Image (cartoon, grey):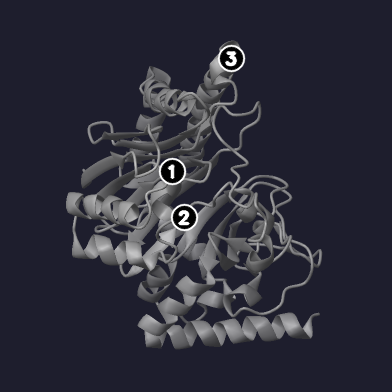
């Protein structure tokens, strides 16, 4: 069994009178949650408290537990999708109850909450995200923001509707466009990670992450102050830098992952990536090193591949299914979509999209360049392959 430790802390901050954040650290059930409530008359506190308690109850249901057991016993792509569908359904059920209460009680009208949740099943972690709180993965020397803010600014950036400099002038840039219970509709993002020894996941509200625009600083602090001391130091620094909002952080530290480090699904993906031009000439060890900076995403039918995710230009490596590029070309597994993003080049107008459900690996430019710089031999191979891909794109335009 995976060995882990988890720590959580919340603080009202230096400006707010009440703390409307809620969190859960439950090592026994391996469930971890951060929620940031919104709404007047302390209704945000009600919403965030409801999402924590109600989601815990949903996931403790016998049907949910049987679904989790099936995945633990057979961690295949099919059982993984069953877990993800269950998690989305559970969040939607909680969302409906919060929304119904808000409509029934006038003083709670408009209340809602962000949601970051993580559940560890066997050697795998499943993440759930809605709103502008965040989850970061600290792996090796990298700090990866793995969730995309559901704010107006990030939504417009992802759609290619302007530059960060242009959109930052808007007074509405930080408005949350997706929250549990706030409106009738809700979008729920799910992510899956195969865990490795030393992984650390940081779940936090915007009262913390807004004071750490350089995500690498999060890693610096947590390296200098391991475990619970690091969580306390992050909250303390957010207060020192203004503390204008409630501050909440949960750290999940994977101490050891027993057994083989290459799972059956990872072997399947590595086999598929043998045909990927970006991975040409890489050894198994180099391919695994490269995969550590990638974030796997399940694509819904019709979903676009945003140019910018988590504040950085992003390319996508197709793992499963078909994607349609901005030029209208259909491409399959192994193809690198938006390759110019890795070097900051211009892209054609429009966004690539998934006509049918599929899976991709998201690769942010800064993470790619840092990998190339930290591992020079691997970096040379990756950059040569990227040059070939870009040359092919140029000759086919």
Q: Is residue 42 left or right of residue 384?
A: left
On the question of residue 379 being in view, the answer is yes
Q: Position of residue 24 (x, y in %)?
A: 31, 33
Which mark is first along the chain, 1 or 3?
3
Q: Is residue 104 left or right of residue 212?
A: right
C-alpha span from label 2 to label 3: 36 Å
Q: Is residue 228 left or right of residue 367?
A: left
Query: Eyeballing the image, is 269 above or below 66?
Result: below
Q: Position of residue 352 (x, y in %)?
A: 72, 60
- Report which quarter residue 319 is drawn in: bottom right
- Which residue matches tag 2? 146
The residue under the point 37% across, 57% down is 137
- Which residue matches tag 1? 127
Q: Position of residue 282 (x, y in %)?
A: 44, 79
Mark 1 residue crowding within 10 angstroms, few (<14) / some (14–19) / many (20+): many
- Element at label 3: helix
On the question of residue 264 being in view, the answer is no
Query: Eyeballing the image, is 41 above or below 366?
Result: above
Where residue 323 is drawn, which disc sits there?
none
Which quadrant of the figure contains the C terminus? bottom right
The reply to whether discs 1 and 2 touch (Cβ–Cβ < 8 Å) is yes
The residue under the point 63% across, 41% down is 177
Nearer mark to the viewer, of 3 and 1: 3
Mark 2 residue crowding within 10 angstroms, few (<14) / some (14–19) / many (20+): many
- Element at label 2: loop
Where residue 106 is drawn, which disc sits there?
3
Which quadrant of the figure contains the N terminus? top left
Which mark is first along the chain, 3 or 2?
3
The residue under the point 72% across, 80% down is 393
Work out whether residue 195 or residue 168 is closer to the camera in this orientation and state it: 168
Which mark is first along the chain, 2 or 1?
1
């Amino acid at each position: 069994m995976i060995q882990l430790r988890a720590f959580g802390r919340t603080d009202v901050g230096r400006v707010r009178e009440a703390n409307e954040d809620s969190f859960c650290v439950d090592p026994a059930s391996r469930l971890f949650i951060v929620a940031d409530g919104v709404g007047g008359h302390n209704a945000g506190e009600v919403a965030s408290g409801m999402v924590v308690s109600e989601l815990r109850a949903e996931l403790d249901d016998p049907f949910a537990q049987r679904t989790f057991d099936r995945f633990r016993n057979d961690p295949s792509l099919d059982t993984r999708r069953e877990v993800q569908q269950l998690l989305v359904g559970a969040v939607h059920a909680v969302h409906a109850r919060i929304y119904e209460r808000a409509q029934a009680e006038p003083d709670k009208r408009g209340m809602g909450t962000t949601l970051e949740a993580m559940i560890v099943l066997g050697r795998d972690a499943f993440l759930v995200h809605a709103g502008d709180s965040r989850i970061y993965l600290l792996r090796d020397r990298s700090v990866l923001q793995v969730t995309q803010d559901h704010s107006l600014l990030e939504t417009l950036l992802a759609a290619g509707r302007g530059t960060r400099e242009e959109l930052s002038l808007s007074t509405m840039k930080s408005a949350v466009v997706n929250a549990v219970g706030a409106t009738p509709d809700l979008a729920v993002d799910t992510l899956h990670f195969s865990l490795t020894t030393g992984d650390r996941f940081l779940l936090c509200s915007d009262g913390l992450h807004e004071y750490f625009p350089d995500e690498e600083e999060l890693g610096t602090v947590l390296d200098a102050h391991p475990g619970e001391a690091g969580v306390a130091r992050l909250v303390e620094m957010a207060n020192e830098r203004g503390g204008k909002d409630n501050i909440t952080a949960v750290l999940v530290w994977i101490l050891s992952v027993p057994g083989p480090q290459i799972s059956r699904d990872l072997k399947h993906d590595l086999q598929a990536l043998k045909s990927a031009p970006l991975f040409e000439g890489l050894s198994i060890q180099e391919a695994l090193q490269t995969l550590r900076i990638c974030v796997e995403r399940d694509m819904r039918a019709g979903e676009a591949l945003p140019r910018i995710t988590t504040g950085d230009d992003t390319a996508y490596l197709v793992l499963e299914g078909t994607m349609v590029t901005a030029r209208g070309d259909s491409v399959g597994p192994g193809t690198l979509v938006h390759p110019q993003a890795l070097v900051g080049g211009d892209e054609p107008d429009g966004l690539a999209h998934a006509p049918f459900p599929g899976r991709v690996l998201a690769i942010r430019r800064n993470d790619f360049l840092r990998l190339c710089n930290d591992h020079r031999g691997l970096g040379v191979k990756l950059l040569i392959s990227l040059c070939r891909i870009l040359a092919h794109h140029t000759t086919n335009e």
